[in-house]
Amino acid sequence: MDENKKLSLQVEVARCYERFWDKNQLSIDSKGKVFRTTIPRERPSQEVDFRNGKTKKGEKSGKVY
């Protein structure tokens, strides 16, 4: 793959990621129709590690993924 294409793909993904988090949350009404609320999306905290301690790299949990 051409280096320019890789860079442009990375830029596009970064823009889409930011656009996703800038929009408000979605919800479903009583008729099953999706609509956008006025509640802003909350970004995940960078400080929290959501992985289970048993599934972190370097540790074996005995499970097959």
Image (cartoon, rainbow, N blue to C red):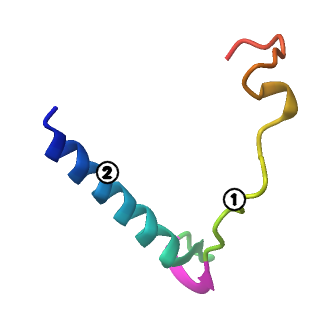
Circle 2 residue: 10
- The disc labelled 1 sits on which kind of residue? Gln
Decide if residue 2 is on the left or right side of residue 43.
Answer: left
Residue 5 image position (x, y, % from top left):
16, 45
Horizontal side of 35 relative to 14 (left or right) equals right
Q: Residue at x 78, y 14 (%)?
A: 63
Q: Residues within 10 Å of mark 2 (few under 14, many from 20)?
A: few
- Point out residue 52 in the picture as x, y percentages from the top left corner: 83, 35
Residue 19 belongs to magenta span = no
Question: Is 29 located above or below residue 15 in the figure?
Answer: below
Secondary structure of the residue carrying tag 1 is loop
Q: Relative to 28, say whether 64 is above or below.
A: above
Q: Secondary structure at mark 2?
A: helix
Q: Which one is nearer the viewer's eye here, 34 or 6? A: 6
Compared across the picture, whether 9 is left or right of 55 comes to: left
The residue indicated by pointer 1 is 46
The front one of 52 and 64 is 52
Q: Is residue 29 above or below residue 17?
A: below
The mark that comes first in sequence, 1 or 2, is 2
In this view, the residue farthest toward the bottom is: 38
Number of marks: 2
Q: Give the quarter of the image for residue 54.
A: top right
At a point 41% along the width and 71% down the height, the residue shown is 19
User: Which residue is at a point 68% across and 62% down the rendered structure image?
Assistant: 44
Residue 47: x and y in percent read 76, 58
Given the image, on which type of amino acid does mark 2 rest? Gln
Callout 1 environment at 10 Å: few (<14), some (14 to 19), or many (20+)?
Answer: few
Tell me where the magenta segment starts and ends, as one range. 33-40
Identify the residue shown where x is 72% and y is 62%. 45
Residue 62: percent from the left, percent from the top? 83, 10
Q: Left of 2 or right of it: where is 27? A: right
Magenta span: predominant SS is strand
